[in-house]
Amino acid sequence: MAVCFNFTFQKLHRPDLIAPIVQAHSQAPAVIGIHQSSHSEIRRLMGLAYELKQMKPAPQFYFDHHRCTGVDEHNCAVPSTKFQQALASLPRPFDVWLIDFKDVPDLSDQQCVFDSDLGTKIAPGFKYQHYRCGSKEA
């Protein structure tokens, strides 16, 4: 008798597709920030954290809370000031993975460079971008 895994009731969100990419492309400790406007993002980030539980060093996770309605919707395209301040305080180097931000934000103030080779990718339930953050003096 054959047993199929994740075949009949496959999840809508697929953190199992992103976790190997984060592991393969992170050259330094990873920081994973997700745009959070509802409980759905908490569930998705928990799924991703579960998939990355073996990663060494363990990634740091950050919920970037925004309320995006009407006129303020453009604010959800970029990380909040609090998130950017958190990045500025971290020891260098590190890799940032942004989940579900609408645009490719400019994180040059935090000495973070967008990984244009990887670009912006979409996996079921996730839109993600990778940044490499180096020395503050650079």
Image: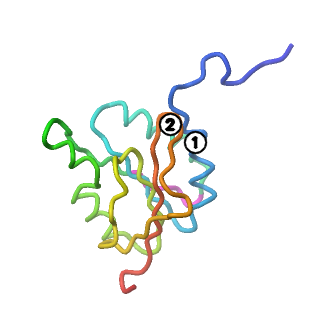
Q: Residue drawn 33% across and 65% down? A: 106
Say left or right for 107 vs 20.
Answer: left
Locate residue 59, reporting x and y percent.
49, 55
Q: For the residue marked with disc 2, what is the amino acid?
A: Gly
Mark 1 Cα shell of 10 Å, populated few (<14), some (14-19), many (≥20):
some
Q: Residue drawn 43% across and 71% down? A: 133
Q: Where does label 1 land, which residue?
A: 51
Q: Residue drawn 44% across and 65% down? A: 114
Judging depth in this view, the residue of 58 and 30 nearest the camera is 30
Residue 134 image-quadrant placement? bottom left
Q: Main secondary structure of the magenta part?
A: loop
Q: For the residue marked with disc 1, what is the amino acid?
A: Glu
- How far, Cα to Cα, is label 2 from label 1? 6 Å
Q: Residue furthest right?
A: 1
Residue 5 image-quadrant placement? top right
Q: Are marks 2 and 1 in contact (CB under 8 Å)?
A: yes
Task: Examine the rendered structure and indicate whether residue 46 appears above or below residue 105.
Answer: above
Q: Which stretch did the figure color magenta?
A: 56-61
> Any magenta on residue 90?
no
